[in-house]
Image: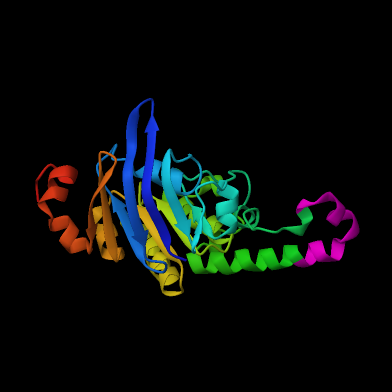
Amino acid sequence: MTLSVHGLRKSFSGLCVVDDVSFEADPVGITGLIGPNGAGKSTLFSVITGFLGADAGTISFDGGKIQTLSPQARARRGLVRTFQVPRPFADLSVRENLMVAAASQTGEHVLSLLLRRGTVRQRESAVMAQANALLEFLGLSHLAASRAGGLSGGQQKLLELGRALMTEPRYILLDEPYAGVNPVLIEQISLRIRSLSQRGTGFLIVEHNLPALSRLADRLLVMDRGRLIASGAPEAVLADPVVQDAYIGGSA
């Protein structure tokens, strides 16, 4: 399930935003992606997950090239992402937001609704059980019937993670899971990510909260001006003068 990127490029109006980026991410580890604003991190995420097309380069996942596949096809292979700003179905309940994310729902097809009602009910029951188990895992069971639009920012981040998990992914790209989240929920999110990693799910995480990410990640990648400038263990990467100069202006 290794995620491998080789020679990836993406430009907008002649400006190269992702410039010859290559790396391999641990299939079951936690890899952090850091860099200053404008470094190209979000664009790289969008190219890897198919929301933007690559100008050049290859993306491989689980041994097969996926750079020509749609986001949906990549998700079906087990590669999914979350977004920096969660967008739940605000008027649906927290449980319903999870349930709509489940794949292979028999009731989505009109003929099945008419001719396979028993199968539809069985699948709905299975999806609800899956959603309830995830709510318990995420610590959101007490909010299952609550309107999703009323959740706090941190709770919406957990819900966003839960919606990704409903697709039963093998690798998840998280876009700033700690942004706007209080320290208590940051720790709660980290615990869930670590637990999922120990169960075999891989993660690539873009995040500006360096202390929290460096405690969580096994490895850090650093981008600056579209290029990958460093890779390695968090302590070594953050002590690298090149990284300090690019990321925090040379200050410790």
Whether 229 is among the magenta residues is no
In the depicted view, which residue is nearer to us: 218 or 57? 57
**Residue 190 location, quadrant:** bottom left
Q: In this rendering, is residue 197 above or below 6?
A: below
Residue lying farthest right? Answer: 115
Question: Where's residue 42, x and y in %?
Answer: 38, 43
Bounds of the magenta segment: 108-122
Query: Residue at point 59% right, 52% down?
Result: 73
Whether 116 is among the magenta residues is yes
Q: How many marks?
A: 0
Q: In this rendering, is residue 78 above or below 9?
A: below
Query: Residue at point 41% right, 61% down?
Result: 203
Question: Where's residue 233, x and y in %?
Answer: 22, 64
Residue lying farthest bottom? Answer: 199
Q: In this rendering, is residue 230 above or below 47?
A: below
Question: Where's residue 161, x and y in %?
Answer: 49, 57
Query: Residue at point 45% right, 52% down?
Result: 59
How are the residues colored?
rainbow
Is 8 placed left or right of 236 in the picture? right
Please name the predominant secondary structure of the magenta segment in the image.
helix
Q: Is residue 10 visible?
A: yes
Is 228 placed left or right of 144 in the picture? left
In the depicted view, which residue is nearer to us: 33 or 158? 33
In the depicted view, which residue is nearer to us: 86 or 173? 173
Q: In this rendering, is residue 193 above or below 158?
A: below
Query: Residue at point 33% right, 52% down?
Result: 22
Q: Is residue 147 visible?
A: no
**Residue 84 location, quadrant:** top left
Question: Where's residue 249, x and y in %?
Answer: 12, 42
Residue lying farthest top? Answer: 13
